[in-house]
Image (tube, rainbow, N blue to C red):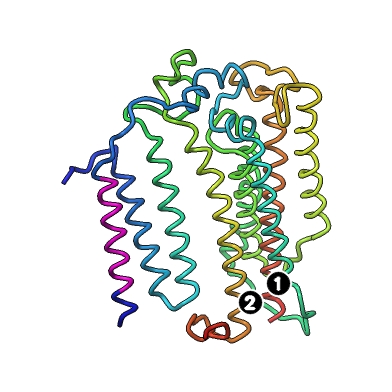
Amino acid sequence: MKEITIDNVSIIVGFLLILIGIWGFLTQKNLLKMIISFTLFNSGLNIIIVAIGYIKDRTAPIIDSSVNKANAVNEIVDPVPHALVLTAIVIGLGVTALMLVFALKLSKHKNSLDISKYNDLKW
Amino acid sequence: MFKRLFIFVLLLGLGYIFFSLVENYQGKTELSGIGRYYAERGADELGSANLVTSVVVTYRGLDTLGEVSILFLTALIIGFVLSGKAAPEKHKFNPASEILTTASKMMIPIVFMFGVYVFINGHLSPGGGFQGGAIIASGVALLLLAQPDKKINHTLISFIESISGIGFVIVGILGILLAGGFLDNRIMELGTFGHILSAGSIPIIYIFVGLKVGSELTSILSNLQETQTQE
């Protein structure tokens, strides 16, 4: 068992969030709780991607007074995962908004948020 | 019963996979491949102090255009799904509390100003178009909480949204004509490194992105609010 260090603490948290998210959308019956589980899964993935770009003792990829422009390669963390996660967060926001609106529409249709009542396509 | 067992076994298996991934994970000590290129050349090539911004807006600018389109599609689908039956009669909301209405009058201009600050300074500090747009939309959400009967002008919102979308694409095409390629930011002087008027067209693109994201999220919010009124 490896000890928890600053290198892997965010990765552990991210994987835990993913597991909670999967457990949530497999077991919960309430539509809103399922949507919350999806967003937890999403956040866990984002945390892991950012954590993979982390390099110990380095700072954010913004060149200002604390980073020497010529020596930036040895002073900043990886900017690519940050850019990827920026995209992923926005897409996640869009997906969550769509899920919430569908849940709203469904709840008006049958006046319930319980997923087991929606069995029209079940055989 | 069988279903629960299946879920339990699935989670256990995934947990084992994740555990072995964490167990064998070695923290990085060096930048890899493309990250090294951006760190070495990004600041000199594009003049943007925030390297993430230079990746998002210029090196991978096409992805950002796609991302903005996805957000636009989301707003469109939400508007489509929520549209429908006309409001039978006006539903009156209870007025918001004194504290909320008073505080919102003070807070909303500051929230809007902060959103604009975040997307104008996207190339110098953490932040950018998406974050600034989200902050502006949160100001609108506060406005709708404080005044539930407030109508948001859809014509204005869609006008801002289409103008900024077209502006984004036009700046991209100008990059083909005046500089290296689509969405190249060197269509104008790069300016002094680290000043607000620097990094070529990155601030312009981020202003467009910020306005577009802000108006898209606002239209989602106002669509949701109108279905509330139709109850």
By secondary structure, the bulk of the magenta-drawn segment is best described as helix
For residue A100, side relative to residue B229 (left or right): left
Q: Which residue is mark 1?
A: B82
Residues at marks 1 and 2 on the same chain: no
For residue A116, above or below residue B185: below
Image spot of residue B148 (x, y percent): 67, 69
For residue B91, above or below residue B133: below
Image spot of residue B106 (x, y percent): 62, 52
Image mark 2: chain: A
Image spot of residue B44 (x, y percent): 58, 16
For residue A115, above or below residue B148: below
Badge 1 marks a residue whose secondary structure is: helix
Residue A90 shown in magenta: no
Tell me whether the residue at label 1 lies in contact with that at label 2, contact meaning CB atoms closer than 8 angstroms.
yes
Residue at position x 46%, y 70% in the image: A34
Residue at position x 36%, y 57% in the image: A17
Residue B7 shown in magenta: yes
Q: Residues within 10 Å of mark 1 (few under 14, many from 20)?
A: some
Image spot of residue A40 (x, y percent): 43, 59
Q: Which residue is mark 2?
A: A105
For residue A45, side relative to residue B1 (left or right): right
Image mark 1: chain: B
Q: Residues within 10 Å of mark 2 (few under 14, many from 20)?
A: some
Mark 1: which amino acid?
Leu
Q: How many marks?
A: 2
Outermost residue to the top: A70
User: Disc 1 to disc 2, how far (Cα)?
Assistant: 7 Å
Q: Which residues are magenta?
A: B6-22
